[in-house]
Each structure stands twice: as structure tokens, then as C-alpha cells.
Image (tube, rainbow, N blue to C red):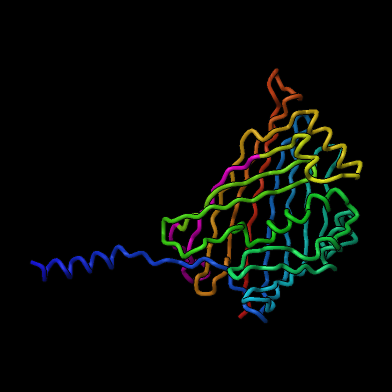
Amino acid sequence: MKTILLPLWCTLALLSAEEKVDVRLDWQAGKSYQQGIKLEQFIGIPRHGEASAHTDFDMKLEAQEGKKSSRNLLLTFSRMKMEADLPLPLGNEEFDSRQPAEGNQEIGDFYKSLQHSPMKLLLDPRGKVLEVVGLDKLSGGNSVLGRFLGREQMKNFLQQGGLVELPKAPVARGENWPFQSVFPTPVGKLLIKGKYTLTGTREHLGKPHHVIAMEGQVQGDFSAAAVSASGKETDPEVLRIQGMMILMGVTVKEGTTTGTLLYDSSRHLLVSSEVSTNIRLSVAKFPENGKPAEIPIQQKMSLQLIPSP
């Protein structure tokens, strides 16, 4: 009986043993990578209609040697295209860096500051973005746009396609790890907390990739305390927006973020992702039919990475 049970136990143990995946980002020094990011944004404005924007970024990432096995990524923006559909009296805005003379000049000035000020991403040994060097050189004509794309926002935006946190150890299918992102803005801050789960595999470009599911909750604080904590502000337009949000009692009623990320374990890179964030703001002092008004905000970000041969 023992001779039968022993091989049976070994067989069951092998079948139940799940291969673990070491999820990290390994940018190879000396190589360059092409990356595209698409942003789709929508906001509903009470009594005014809807506003939407579509923005495409193309960028080049060049991996350099760092200290203690870490990597530095030199990032250069190579193209930006933006289309904004705004309610009257604002109208529509367009900009394409391939035809800069025909688009919005304020957006164009901000893009020039991105294009002519390469940024350096400092990574930890597992590939997580620790800091973005060069953000202080941004000086677009649209000061409000520049403030909303501040240090923490850009750091999270540039972290690979929503993978803002890496697991501390290899994970098996069904296992998860937490993440947390803080987005300070001139009018308060947003906090996103959630988890990643390794769910299985999917074919991408003729090759199997590991699938990472993302889900989280969004909280927000636009109170006077949060605004003052974001630092002393002098821009009159930003100050006007701050005052309006505080006086109108704007809060986050509910917010969620979900996404699917494809990870190439052979090259240790995230090659594709789609992340959607949905937020409903409540405006207490701007009632509709006796109830607080709501402002729906939707954002979808997709990423495609093409490693060098």
C-alpha cells in the first residue's frame, strides 16, 4: 500500500504545485523602447453639458546603468496629439505635434517643454519608479495644466501602465498584492487603494503572457485643509478653482479603478495594459431638484510597449 500511496502523493503534489511568477520590470541597459499611451477622459458638467478629451503620447525610453543594480530610464516625448470637445462657450481644442502651427498654442507650449526637457526616471532594483528628475524644467504657457501635471502625478503616470506597485516575492495564480497611489492636486488630493491579482495567461502577439487584474477604490479630499497642505498657491486661476470647490462642497461620492495588464515574464516587462477609473463627485451646494448635483468623471488609459529587438 505504501508503494502505491507514495507515487500517488508525489503526483498530486506536482499537479497542485503552481508556477510562481517574479513580477518585476527589467529594463536592459543600452536598449531603447518605444511606448505609446492613450488617455480618454470624460466629465459631465451640471447645466453645461459634457467635456471630453483624447490624448495620445508617444515616447522613447532609453535604459541606462544605475547604482546597485538599479536602472535609470531617460524618457523623451516624441509625439503628442490632443482633441478636446468642450461645452460652450469654450468650444473645441486640438493640438498635434506633427502640425503644431494649427493647434492650441498653450497646449503646444506645454508640449514643447516636455519635448525639450528629457526626464530621467530613477528606478529601484525591481523596476519601480522612485523619482522623476527634470519635472522642474516644465514651463508651459498653460500654468494650470502644468500644475495638474506635477511631480507625483507624473511619477504615477509614467509608472508602467498602472503597475504602480510590484510584489515583494514571486506570486502564483490567484495570489494578490496591494497598491496605493496618492495624487496631490492644486485643489486637494486623490487616494487610490486596491490590489493586483495574477489571474492566468493570454496570448498577445503570438506569445502567452501573464494576466494581472487590477481593482481599487478612489477617495478624495478637496477641503480647505487638503488645499492648504498642497502648498502655497499664487496662480489666480488655480486659486479661483480652489475657492469654488470649497464653497460648493465638492466631495468624492464614489470612485473605482479596474484594469487588465499583460506581463511578459521572459523579458520581465509590462507590454500592454488598459485601466479605467470612474469617479462620481457630489456638489452639495449646487443642488439639482433639491438634491446635491453629481459630476461623473471617467478616464481610460491604455499602454503599448514595443521592446527593441
In this orientation, which residue lies closer to the viewer: 64 or 102? Answer: 64
Q: Is residue 210 magenta?
A: yes
In this orientation, which residue lies closer to the viewer: 110 or 178? Answer: 178
* Residue located 48% across and 71% down the image: 207
In this orientation, which residue lies closer to the viewer: 152 or 95? Answer: 152
Q: Point out residue 141 in the picture as x, y percentages from the top left corner.
A: 91, 54
Q: Is residue 132 magenta?
A: no
Query: Residue lying furthest left in this view?
Result: 1
Residue bounds of the magenta highlight: 199-219
Horizontal arrangement in the rendering, residue 97 relative to residue 125 (left or right) = right
Query: Residue lying furthest top in this view?
Result: 290
Q: Point out residue 263 in the picture as x, y percentages from the top left corner.
A: 53, 65
Quadrant of the drawing holding the C terminus: bottom right
Horizontal arrangement in the rendering, residue 112 relative to residue 128 (left or right) = right
* Residue located 66% across and 43% down the image: 298
Q: Main secondary structure of the magenta part?
A: strand
Q: Point out residue 25 in the picture as x, y percentages from the top left corner.
A: 58, 69
In this orientation, which residue lies closer to the viewer: 299 or 158? Answer: 158
* Residue located 87% across and 37% down the image: 240
Say if 245 sits above or below 214 in the image.
above
Query: Residue lying furthest front in this view?
Result: 68
Name the quadrant containing residue 26. bottom right
Quadrant of the drawing holding the N terminus: bottom left
Name the quadrant containing residue 245. top right
